[in-house]
Amino acid sequence: MEDKTKQRSVAQNLILENRAKLNISGVIEVGSFNEEYVSMKTELGELMIYGRELKINKLNVENSEVAIEGNIQCLEYSDKKGAKTKGASLFSKLFK
């Protein structure tokens, strides 16, 4: 028998609207959050969202989706190997 976890496709979407609304798919779990940051484990590694007045508006466990609103200032990935990606480098890695 083949291992089904190896066949699982890695898919994640980040949709940021006017730096005020962020919709994320491919979320495995939300670790911690407050008004200044949200930490979550995703299909592509750890994701930290920094900003002001952040709140989680939607958490859909079945579809692995999270919706965040507030003043979003920074998205930071830490991949599964522990290397961090921040700021403009995040977008350069996304569009390789």
Image (cartoon, rainbow, N blue to C red):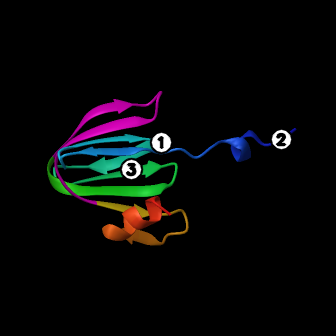
- The x and y percentages for residue 44 are 51, 54
Question: What main secondary structure does the magenta stretch of the protein show?
Answer: strand
Report the residue at 41% width, 66% height from top: 92
Residue 57 among those drawn in magenta: yes
Query: Which numbered disc, 2 or 3, marks the residue that appears first in the sequence?
Result: 2
The tag on residue 60 is none
Label 2 – label 1 distance at C-alpha: 23 Å
Q: How far is mark 3 from mark 1, CA to CA?
A: 10 Å
The structure residue drawn at horizontal position 18% and vertical position 56%, both measured from the top left corner, is 51
Q: Amino acid at mark 2?
A: Glu
> Residue beneath label 3, please?
40
* Label 1 residue SS: loop
Q: Which mark is residue 2?
A: 2
Percent coordinates x, y for residue 40 in the rendering: 39, 50
Q: Residues within 10 Å of mark 1 (few under 14, many from 20)?
A: some
Q: Position of residue 83 (x, y in %)?
A: 48, 72
Judging depth in this view, the residue of 49 and 15 nearest the camera is 15
State the quadrant of the N terminus.
top right
Residue corresponding to mark 1: 26
Residue span colored magenta: 54-74
Q: Amino acid at mark 1?
A: Gly
